[in-house]
Amino acid sequence: MLKVDQDGWSPGRCHCGAVRFRVRLTDGLDSARRCDCSFCRMRGAVAVTAGLGGVEVLEGADLLTEYRFNTGVARHYFCSTCGIYTHHRRRSNPDEYGVNAACLDVSPFSFAEVPVNDGRRHPSDTGIKDAVVGVLRFKARRD
């Protein structure tokens, strides 16, 4: 369950706790998605959405490492100590951040289904918005 304070902010952190931040999600957990671009396929995180003013780094800003590739528009941020991806500024909508749901103490396995966006044929290249290429499903094993 996502923790939200009275002002709509949720706490977030990397694995080692050196980077701490807070987010105000635009659609709560309803915006959960993954991407199939070359980078996101390897990263594997479930991302949720925050607006540009919806991510505030509270501690460890100097420990965040930025990574860009291909067009260089998307900015991916990682803790330089533990390596965890915390958030990124989107290429598809530079007015938004994608935030690693696991950094908000929300397990990626809490989502029964997660839409996968078409990152190989990126919306910024094709003009097709919200192209979903599939859905990842998690089915818990009963012991």
Image (cartoon, rainbow, N blue to C red):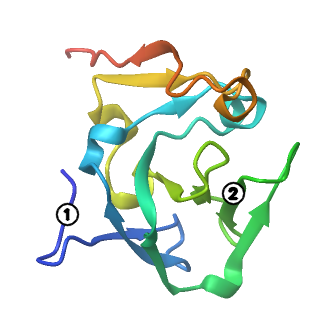
Q: Could you classify mark 1 by the number of other residues whose Cα lies within 10 Å: few (under 14), some (14-19), or many (20 or more)? A: few
Residue at left offset 61%, top offset 56%? 94
Residue at left offset 75%, top offset 70%? 65
In the depicted structure, whether residue 5 falls above or below residue 74: below
> Dot 2 corresponds to which residue?
76
Tell me if residue 66 can be seen.
Answer: yes
Q: Could you classify mark 2 by the number of other residues whose Cα lies within 10 Å: few (under 14), some (14-19), or many (20 or more)? A: many
Numbered marks: total = 2
Residue at left offset 51%, top offset 56%? 96
Residue 95: x, y in percent?
A: 54, 59
Residue 102: x, y in percent?
A: 42, 51
* Quarter of the image where one finds residue 83: bottom right
Quadrant occupied by the C terminus: top left
Residue 49: x, y in percent?
A: 41, 51
Give 45 or 95, whichever is nearer the viewer.
Answer: 95
Amino acid type of the residue tagged 2 in the rendering: His
Question: Residue 121's mark?
Answer: none
Is 30 displayed left or right of 91 in the figure? Answer: left
Amino acid type of the residue tagged 1 in the rendering: Lys
Q: Secondary structure at mark 1?
A: loop
> Dot 1 corresponds to which residue?
3
In the depicted structure, whether residue 131 falls above or below residue 4: above
Q: Nearer the viewer, mark 1 or mark 2?
A: 2
Q: Secondary structure at mark 2?
A: strand
